[in-house]
Image (tube, rainbow, N blue to C red):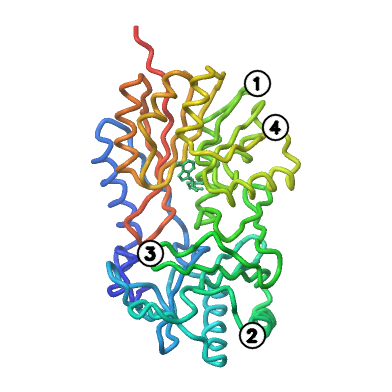
Amino acid sequence: MKCDISKRCGSCQYINMDYHQQLVKKQEECQKLFPHLNVHSVEGMDHPYEYRNKVIVAFNQKYEYGLYEESSHKIVPTQKCLLHDEETHKILSKIQSLFRKYRMSIYDEKKNRGFMKHVLIRRAVSTNQTLVVLVATDGMFKGSKNFCQELVKACPTVKSIVLNVNKRQTSVVLSDNEKVLYGKGFIVDELCGLTFKISARSFYQINHEQCVKLYAKVKELLNSQKDEIILDTYCGIGTIGMSVADKCQEVIGVELNKDAYKDALNNAKMNHIDNVRFINDDATEFMIQMANKHQSVDSIIMDPPRAGSTKEFIHSVKVLQPKKVVYVSCDPTTQARDLKWFKEIGYQASDVYLYDMFPHTGHVECVVLLTKVHNG
Ligand code: SAH
């Protein structure tokens, strides 16, 4: 499939490259970053399109919508992006026609004037539910009732519509000021045989099919025993921790984002998992406290954002001395840096497993198992 907009939008650097070649390129680049490790070939997708379950678009004054051009704030009109499913397109074009019909005031960045800033669509692919988040400069959305009714009637997969009020002139799309306009403010998805509640600001893996493979690998590498205590750090809504909870004594998840943390608590309840608990804290702070208390921990899962983890986090691992650390990363550059710090504290990896979570982009998801190096 060819994309005629990618050159200008810049989100998919590799879209016009043969898919197999993309996978080879990603593997080679990772091998350069991890020269001493066995970097496996990338686990790709059979149909590497329509995989993104989340999209954020902006509208211009002509009611065209799209992503921003690379390194600028110019909107590239995107009627059909190859990474989003049909339903996402259908909903976006309905929203477009409603904006036109109601002469929606569109935010003008240069003048810092107008109402509607962004539209975020999040799809739960297993349950076919959709969450629509309208990001606006004001909490007063006149005519919101009619707008919601018409949208839901035309697109019945829309189970909830949220107004996120972001008055600030910033590149951060969502604020923490939210108002539910329709439904419950969240959607529910199924993943790895479990049910997850996902609200607007919580992190959720954007590629469902690849996420299932990734989590299976984490579980395999952990290979935990029934009496083990596992930490799931940077746990989001608790997905990884809950998917390994049946194979250990206890999982403790830690997550900084309050909404994701609350979703995690609900998710544990919803799935009747009672050997998992969650802490709303910075992962490094939490690790330092665990180390100060010399808590007993058998394995640690870590899945930090692109910036990677911290030296202090890794120094706490040195104190806690878990048997294993499974490190999941969406940025191999920062992971490679962190692995050097791990080496200094006596933990080493041998294999790097790669998952193509983001086909057609330059990104790849990496998983490594770190174990204690025995000296003699
Ligand atoms: N493991 C989860 C989430 C991974 S994304 C999953 O597979 O879905 C990384 C998560 O780390 C996000 O939920 C983000 O909110 C959280 N996060 C970012 N910085 C953090 C920090 N300093 N301490 C704890 N969590 C953090």
Residue at disc 4, secondary structure: loop
**Residue at left offset 55%, top offset 22%:** 297
Q: Amino acid at mark 4?
A: Asn
Report whether the residue tagged 2 is closer than 8 Å to ligand 1.
Answer: no
Mark 2, residue position: 143
Are dots 4 and 1 in contact, CB under 8 Å? no
Q: Which label was assigned to residue 171?
A: 3
The x and y percentages for residue 89 are: 52, 77
The x and y percentages for residue 198 are: 62, 56
Marks 4 and 1, the one that precedes in the sequence: 1
**Residue at left offset 58%, top offset 73%:** 139
Answer few, some or many: residues within 10 Å of disc 1's Cα (few below 14, many 20 plus, some between 14 and 19). few
Residue at disc 2, secondary structure: loop
Of discs 2 and 1, which sits in the foreground?
Answer: 2
The x and y percentages for residue 97 are: 54, 88
Q: Is residue 319 left or right of residue 243?
A: left
Q: Is residue 280 above or below residue 263?
A: above
Mark 4, residue position: 275
Q: Which label was assigned to residue 169?
A: none
Mark 1, residue position: 227
Q: Amino acid at mark 3?
A: Ser
Residue at disc 1, secondary structure: loop
Compare residues 59 and 298 and report the one nearer the observer.
59
Answer few, some or many: residues within 10 Å of disc 3's Cα (few below 14, many 20 plus, some between 14 and 19). few
Are dots 2 and 3 in contact, CB under 8 Å? no
Of discs 3 and 4, which sits in the foreground?
Answer: 3
Q: Is residue 198 above or below residue 193?
A: below
- CA distance for labels 1 and 3: 45 Å
